[in-house]
Each structure stands twice: as C-alpha cells, then as structure tokens.
Amino acid sequence: MHASPFFLSDVAGFLGGYYAFIAAMNGVFAFLLWRKYGQPGWAITWSAFAAAMMVLASLALSGAPSLVPALPDSVRNVVNALSGPVLYSLGTVALFTVLFIFRKFFVQSMVAWTILNAALVLMGLSMADQNFAAIVMKPDNVPIVGLVFLLAFFTWVATKQAVVNDERIARGEPPMEKLNDEKVLVWPDLVYTELICMVAVAAFLLLWAICLPAPLEEPASSVKTPNPSKAPWYFLGLQEMLVYFDPWYAGVVLPSLVVFGLMAMPYLDFNKKGNGYYSIAERKFAYLSYQFGFLVLWITLIILGTFLRGPNWNFYGPFEYWTPYKVEVLNNVDLNQMFWVQWLDMPLPRAAADAPWYSQLGHILLRESPGLVVLGLYLVALPPLLAVTIFRGMFAKMGFIRYLIMSNLMLLMLSLPLKMALRWTMNLKYIVSIPEISLNF
Amino acid sequence: MAIGETIRNSQIWKSIFRHPMPLDRRNRIVVMLTNFFLHLHPVSIKKQGIALSFTWCMGGVTFFLFMVETVTGVLLMFYYRPTLEWAYNDILALRDVTSLGILRELHRWGAHAMVITTWLHMYRVFLTGSYKPPREFNWVVGVILLLLTLLLSFTGYLLPWDQLAIWAITVGSNMARATPFLGYEGPGQQLLTIGGIDMITDKSDARFGLLGARFVGEETLNRFYVLHCIAIPLAVALLLAIHFWRVRKDGGISGPL
C-alpha cells in the first residue's frame, strides 16, 4: 500500500456527490412506486435505502479517514488474495450461467433494482480504496465503467422483453412487438424522438467533457517504455489473449476470424424464428453462441485486461498496488516436451544439422506429431463427429458447406477458453511449436 | 397578422422550404417527401420501430456522435499540426491556452462513446434477430462500419503524440509484425525467399505498410492523420449512406419484409 494521506479528502467530494446521487435516484424511484404504481410497501423500503445513502453521503463528505465509508482492509485483502485469472474467468462464466438459467427471476424490476443498487454501493465503497480508484478513475478507463453499467442495463431490458415474449409464444400468442403493428407518421413521432435524443446526448457529452479532462501524458519518447504498455481499451481483450497465444493467432488470425464470423452469421443462422422481436427460447443456440463470444470472451477480457493487468501484464487484485516488482513464475511447457521428454523419457527427435531438407521436415513432423494429431482430431475429426451426434438436426438443415464453416468458426472460438484451461491445469505453452518457421500454436 | 406568418409567406422562406409547416396530416406527409434532411426517413413507420425499449436509439446516437466527431474534428484540425515538432505542443495548447480547448474533450469522449454505442447498436440488432432476411447484407455493411469505427478511434489515438498515444499504437501495431507470411516475425515468412534473399523484412512487411516506417515515428503520425481525417471518414460516410438506404429498402429496422 502506498497510501497518500490526502487521498481520502480528495475523493470525499466525489463520493459525497455519488452517494447523494444514489439517494436521489432511489427517492425518485420510491416516489414513482408510491404515486404511479401504488406500491407503498416498496416505496417505504427504497425511501429508507435513500435515507441510508444520505447518511453515507454525509459520512463521505466529512473526508475523515475513520468516517469515509470503505470496505474493511480484511475484506480487501481476502479479495486480492482470492482473485486471479482462473477465478475471474470461471467466476464470470458461472455468473452468466446463473443469470441465464434463472433469468425469469433476475429480470423482475425489484430484483434488478436491488442488484443495481448493490453494484453502485460496492463501487462507492471500493472507490475509497486508493489502488482501486487509481485504475478506475484513469480518464480513458472511465468509459469502460460506463460500458459495464450500460451493457448490464440493456441486457436487462432485452432479457425482460424476451422472457415475456417467450411466455407468450409458449401460450400460442404473438410476441409483444407484433401487437404494435399500426403505423404512425414519422413527423412528428420519430423526428421529435430523434431531436430529443440528440439534445440529450449532446448535453451528456458536454457534461462529461466539462467534468473529465482528456488525458495527456508526457511527450512521446521511443526509449521510455511504460510498464504496462497497453493498447487502446477496446483492443485489450485481444491483448489479454496474448497470454495464451502467439501474436500471429491472438492479434491477427483470431480478430480476422471474429470479423469474418460476424459477417457470416446471417448466412449461417437458418432459423427463421425470432426475426424482429426479443426472444431467447426460439433461438437458444444463436443466442448462447453470441453471448458467449460477446459478453464472456470480448467484454470480460477487456475488463480483465484494463483493470486487473498491471506491470509485466501480471494479474493484480482490484485493491492491490501495481508494484512493478511482482514476480510470477512462468514454467509453461510445450506439448512436444511433455510427450517426448516427460512421458516417453526420450530426447526430442532432431535431424543432424547437415541432413537434407526432407529429413529435417520429417523430424519436425515427428517431433510435433502429438500436437498435430490433437489439432487434427479437434478441427478435422470433431466436426463430422458432431454432425452425426448433437448437431445432427443442424447439419441436415444447413448443408455441408455452411455446417463446415459454422462448426470450424465455433471450434476456433472455443480454442481460446480451451487453451486457457490447458494452461491453468497442465501449464501447457504450445500445442504445436515449430520455431523453424515461427509457427507456435 | 403574426410576424411568423409574414416570414413564412415571404418569397425567401418559400424558396428555401418547399413545403408548408407540417401542422396537418397532409403536410406532415409532404414534409418527409420534399425535405432533403428528412427524405432519409419513410413517411410512416410501424409504432414498434420507434419504441425506445425496442430500438434503444443506439444506431441513431452512433450517427449523431459521428457528426459530433466530424464537426469537432474539423475544428480541431485548425489547431493541430501533425508533425513531431508541433503535435504534442498543439494538444498542450488546447488544454492550457486555447479558448475552446474543450473541443478536444468532446472529440475524445465522443469517440469512446461512439465505440460503445456501436457495440450496443449491434447488440440490439442481434438480440431482435434483425440481421435475418432480408437484412443479411446490411448486417455485413454494419460489421465493416464497426471495424472502421475501431480504426478511426485507433488512428486518432496516436495524434496527441504523448506516451499514452505512441505506446498504445506500438502495442497495437506490433501485431501486424506477426501476420502469417506478411509479417517479418510471422509464421511462414521464412518461406518467402527468392534466391536466398528474404522478401519479408522489417522494411517490407505488413507492419511497415501500416506505420510507413520500422517504428512509430513521424511517417506514422502523418499516415494516421490522413487516415483519421480523410480516408476512413470518407469510407464511413459512403457505407453509412448504404446502411441507411438499405434500412429503408429492406422495410424498416427489423422484422420480415
């Protein structure tokens, strides 16, 4: 901990406003519940919560180290000690799985509102930690915090409507969207909405620009490499993949495949249902594939890369100081080493230095045979196997070419989580490693 | 007689606006057909197509942010010179001296917001199944626009020429070094030799093409500046026109034709 004695008094004003904002938000919500929705019980509950937030706001405004609401040191230490790439990745997958399975429960307004408030309070308590605040309040990281809340909000909006529609469809009724089929004139109904949206966005952007100065660091110097050196935040998911893959795959091939896969999507999805309305049940496979790629692989890796990767790309807990002296042991082993040296107790097959090219090639192929067999099974043998088992119906509907593209895109997307799991469990570095042509996978 | 009416009956007003005030049903239809800025829209639209809980308005917000970026970007170009000598100092002046230095904040936060709203727009289009026929191709156009949005942001990231800028671009563009066959550290580039001479070196590979040099330097600044201010915005403008035109021709933002 490199605590500055002025940190808490510096952050006190922000935190006071922050808690007062939560209080105001809940006050308005309680008022609406009382007057508009006729739920006085809930109105009282959220009024009480708003009052509690006002207490936190006044405590925060005191700026006194003993009074500013913060997570206890013990909790922060436990969180730091427990967090790591494995728990983070498995935890987010588990979280999304729970949210998906119990979506009917989580989309209820009161549940969602409770979760939102819990997240906001937790965020506020964490902001009183200097290390946490240092990363989250970096100007270019602020948009990511916004992105997280926006994504949570819109996912809730979409899932709520999907749950309603799926229940209606199960009862044989049309989705809600079909009930709104009548036509209205674009002037005034649409153009006024657009105008209001433009004014609102412009006002928001001005407020943002006034409150938060754009970052400007020291002048560029090609000899002073910052540690960590990070790409712009929207590419940090790709940078995080560099932990598990070489740049040619993580930085070039996989991103190209993401773009290609997105473009191919409408031609691969043969399901005619779910066109023009929110639904999950009618298009579960497409829905889960997209959400896995977008929320689990793209978004959570950006968050990991931005907030939890520090100097030397080491993992740091959310309340941990980014010391550049943290040392992590890297003892990853290639599959060829595991196979020949560890399991067969033999040296790696190697041709004599003056052997002809075909002998060199033969030895390379022999050396890499375990990895090539694994990859061959995965990318060549698995698609037909799936086509006659769990994807039997899809294969019949898609035809050979579309099925081949879909299954390979899917397997290549899954190559990332699989490689992660292999790294965590077996310390596997490369499945195939041919340094002779810089090809490591 | 009200002054407003006098103005609206004047020859000048009538020569600019080809339609009367859209106060009754007939003129609300006429205005959509005769006004250049409104003709992008249809005359009438399904109620569902304008419900905020359904559309999230994110495509529209993205387009609005693109316009904000264009206007603030053009104004910023008055203040900024893309050379090693001036780039950083001009940004410094925008922060400390220039009266309307907040333009830079608007431009930077608008850019971040545009990346986010593009993702949210795409998320909504996916979740409502709006990429399905007849809109497959418009989704493809949208994916290219997403890519161009990221490239706009990426090329702009370099221009302040501070530590944050050059190292983010260095980290990002180092990937090109590993392009299969075309990057000098990429797999397979060893195979591209003619008579023992390497075709792919650090002076001829994909990264060199991107940076215009072997490292992020003045050539890169110039290259990214031109891409950021001219080449990519023009491509985006063209694709936006196609994107919007297809929305009209494909029968609105979602649902089967």
Image: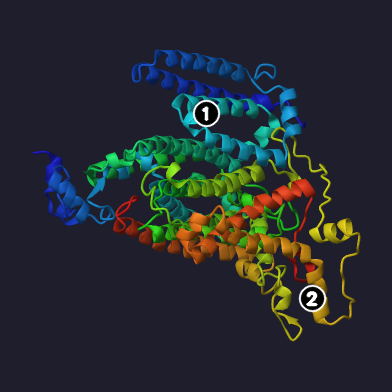
Q: From mark 1 to mark 2, how far is it between C-alphas?
A: 59 Å
Residue at the far bottom in the pictured view: B195
Residue A300 in the image: state x and y as whole percent.
Answer: 61, 43
- The correct choice, above or below, for B13 with respect to A368 in the image is above
- Picture layout, residue A273 above or below residue A38: below
* Camera-side mark, 1 or 2: 2
Give the structural element (helix, strand or loop) at label 1. Answer: helix
Q: Nearer the viewer, residue B126 or A199?
A: B126
**Residue with the mark numbered 2:** A361
Name the amino acid, label 1. Leu
Do the residues indicated by labels 1 and 2 lie within the same chain of the protein? Answer: yes
Residue A109: x, y in percent? Answer: 44, 27
* Residue extending furthest toward the left: B1
Give the residue drawn at x 39%, y 35%: A167
Classify the position of the N terminus of chain B by image quarter: top left
Residue B86 in view (yes/no): no
Question: Considering the numbered disc 2 on the image, is that residue within a helix, a strand or a loop?
Answer: helix
**Residue behind mark 1:** A116
Q: Is residue B79 above or below residue A50?
A: below
The structure residue drawn at horizontal position 55% and vertical position 39%, both measured from the top left corner, is: A148
Counting labels gives 2
- For the residue pair A61 and B119, the one nearer the viewer reads as B119
For disc 2, the chain is: A
